[in-house]
Amino acid sequence: MTTHKFSFLSVLILFVLLSCSRQENKVAYPELNALVDSVRLQYVPDRRDNVYDISVSQWENKPVVRGITSVAEAKTGLLNRIREIRPEAIDSICVLPDENLEDRIYAIANVSVADLRTGPDYDAEMATQLLLGMPMHVLQAERGWYRVKTPEGYVAWVQRGTVIQATKTVVNEWILSKKIIFTDDYGFTYETPDEQGQRISDIVFGNVLKWEGENGRFYGISYPDGRKGYVLKPQSRLFDDWKNPVRLTGESIVRQALLLKGIPYSWGGTSVKAMDCSGFAKTVYLKHGILLRRDASQQAKTGIPIDISNSYDNLLPGDLLFFGKKAEGERKERIRHVGIYMGNKEFIHEAGFVRVNSLDPTQPHYDEGNAVELVRAARIIGAVGTEGIWNFNENPLYQIQK
């Protein structure tokens, strides 16, 4: 009886050790776990872009390399390096997307604004948002949540009830279908072609719905989950017409930015309901059919660098300004904030609410806190199609999935 109990316990321990886990559990082999960290820096330097939760533990005096990653090359590289030292190491690394998802490795946002968090829990910090109709890759499912990768490459968790999980066939049908995009800031969809009729849901700028015909002043529409209704034509455009590359100008960027004045700040927000600083920059450029990276520190690595070392003379309206701490000695550069340059040393940004401030200390709306921490600037105009800046025709998730 004792032997059977021991055997069962051993099997149970092995099962736990070999199960996929997104949480690190470093209980042994400090030198191997240091190697785990080294390989992460090589393959996944930014955890916002990919998943790499791996550690080395012990079972029956053997190292077990366990965890998950979304980069298959990281798994191969790590195991090769570990087995140079410990050939008996046991592989328990799962490469995402999780095989339990089978062929349902896509999802489409099904509410006007879907919140994404840093973990699969409402208590987790807000990370970003996706707009109705936006496709995403599904990497993992856990307790009513999906870990997803957004069109701009950001990894976070979304509540299952706000999206529709989809196969490649379903998401391709959505991509190929005729659609409309809501171009006003706020509005509603209706059960009948009547503004006084029953509403289906709210709708905000950037929401995309399937086109189902026309009825007077309305487009017939359907949601990713199949709900049908109507939206006013004056508040919408056919998506294929809207998403064609537009000619960006500093004037148009500033004009669209000013239309968002007064919208309140919300950490993780990327919609006209509320937004953070980088969400504001994303929304302004989205109004031009352009997708930017999610966070300010990511946006700062894109575009055409502008020299601001001696003056602001090189800046043009529409340029992105990045604020924070410059690199000094062993301290790395830290970007904490982004705004949009308007010209005449003025910039517009999300700081409590969208507002205009100045870099000129002689002006009453001078923003000393940000002016003294201006680190760098980048130009998006002329850089669309370069790394981290997409129009909808170029972004991989808006193309047919092979």
Image (cartoon, rainbow, N blue to C red):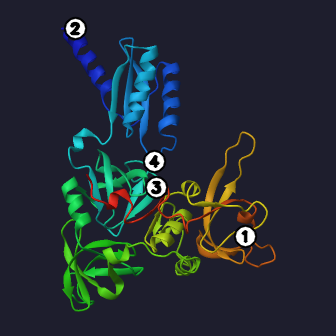
| Kind of residue sitting beneath label 1 | Asp
| Kind of residue sitting beneath label 4 | Asp
Reading the image, the residue beneath label 4 is 49
Residue 367: assigned label: 1
Observer able to see residue 388: yes
Query: CA–CA distance between discs 1 and 3?
Result: 27 Å
Q: Tell me where residue 170 appears, x and y as whole percent.
A: 20, 59
342 or 116: nearer the viewer: 342
Callout 2 touching callout 4 (CB < 8 Å): no
From the viewer's perspective, tell me whether residue 14 is left or right of residue 276.
left
Task: Find numbered disc 3 in the image and state the secondary structure of the residue it sits on.
Answer: strand
Closer to us: mark 2 or mark 3?
Answer: 3
Q: Earlier in the sequence, mark 2 or mark 3?
A: 2
Closer to us: mark 4 or mark 3?
Answer: 4
Query: CA–CA distance between discs 1 and 2?
Result: 73 Å
Q: Tell me where residue 98 appears, x and y as whole percent.
A: 28, 40
Closer to us: mark 2 or mark 4?
Answer: 4
Reading the image, the residue beneath label 2 is 2
152 or 357: nearer the viewer: 152
Query: CA–CA distance between discs 2 and 4?
Result: 49 Å
Reading the image, the residue beneath label 3 is 127
| Kind of residue sitting beneath label 2 | Thr
Pointer 3: residues within 10 angstroms few (<14), some, or many (20+)?
many
Pointer 4: residues within 10 angstroms few (<14), some, or many (20+)?
some
Callout 2 touching callout 3 (CB < 8 Å): no
